[in-house]
Image (spheres, rainbow, N blue to C red):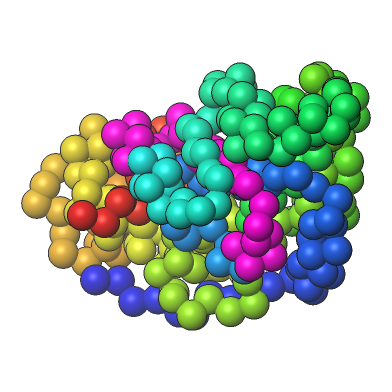
Amino acid sequence: MAQFGQIQWYPGHMTKTKRRIRESMSLIDAVVELIDARIAVSSRNPDLDEMTVGKPRVILLNKADLADDAATAQWIERFRNDAGERKTRALAVDCRTGRGLNGVMPAVKDVLSDKIEAWRAKGMIGRSVHLMVVGIPNSGKSSFINRMAKGGKAKVADKPGVTRGNQWFSAADGTLMLDTPGVLWPKFDDQTVARYLAYTGAIRDEILDSEELACGLLTLLAEDYAPMLTARYKVEPPFPEEAWELLKLIGRKRGMLISGGETDTERAAVMLIDEFRGGKIGRITLERVPR
């Protein structure tokens, strides 16, 4: 089993973001939370429950095109069962292509049905719904808003930490959406969570050791997705016991050699991580619903 160093990353702007989220709660009717379908637990900030308490919520399992469909369906069922008294809906979406987003506004109206009926009773016909869009860095919030908004566009990048301030956008049906910067939490007590976030790109690669990261990812893939590794990299089981040796083998298969015939493991690591994140290895879910 690969050994890992401690991962901690908490940019200073996140403290200000948490304060802004709390200050904005009186302005919004419901919360749209984007999470990564591949890591449906680790990509949820535990602080958000406390910050958005009392507000109905729609959970979007984004990047579902990269995740195992069966696992995503199980997570949707779990979120529905675990909602308790809080009105919650969960949907599988892909914010980059727009797949599944046509179900978002019906889900919002469903969780807000009591409030919308109360508005009608008071003669507030046509009152705009106010949503807060939340999620950890690189969860797809900006892509979601760009798909839904009729006016201004949110900044999009395939890296964490792009959105730095709260911004309002209007959807085609008049719904107002408050975009917020991605919020991580101050300390990763569970380093498994930290590694899942690192594998999927929610933590800046610049602070990570790519070879260590690739070895951790390979440990998981060799256990749960061995046929995909064989199909993609032409490595046959039984795999080497050490993930480092498997990384070297994959690098050699791809012709990533340096002087003396050694494998360029850094290049192989970057390639493996990029291909995982891009779905080239296959549709992979790292976190499964506990049985």
Query: In the picture provided, is 256 more to the left or to the right than 229?
Result: right
Residue 128 occupies quadrant: top right
Query: In the picture provided, is 280 more to the left or to the right than 248?
Result: right
Residue at (68% x, 73% y) in the render: 10
Residue 236 occupies quadrant: top left
Which residue is at the front of the view, 264 or 24? 24
Looking at this view, name the residue that lies furthest to the front.
121
Residue at (16% x, 64% y) in the render: 241
Residue at (23% x, 44% y) in the render: 225
Count of numbered marks: 0
Above/below status of 92 relative to 184: above
Which residue is at the front of the view, 192 or 27? 27
Q: Is residue 123 visible?
A: yes
Q: Position of residue 178 (x, y in %)?
A: 82, 44
Q: Quadrant of the C terminus?
A: bottom left
Q: Position of residue 222 (x, y in %)?
A: 22, 52
Which residue is at the front of the view, 75 or 286? 75
Q: Is residue 71 magenta?
A: yes
Above/below status of 202 relative to 280: below
Which residue is at the front of the view, 252 or 129? 129
What's the magenta region?
Answer: 49-74
Q: Quadrant of the N terminus?
A: bottom left
Q: Position of residue 121 (x, y in %)?
A: 79, 30
Residue 215 occupies quadrant: bottom left
Q: Is residue 284 visible?
A: no
Query: In the picture provided, is 87 more to the left or to the right than 172?
Result: left
Residue at (85% x, 23% y) in the render: 126
Q: Position of residue 91 (x, y in %)?
A: 50, 33
Looking at this view, name the residue that lies furthest to the left.
238
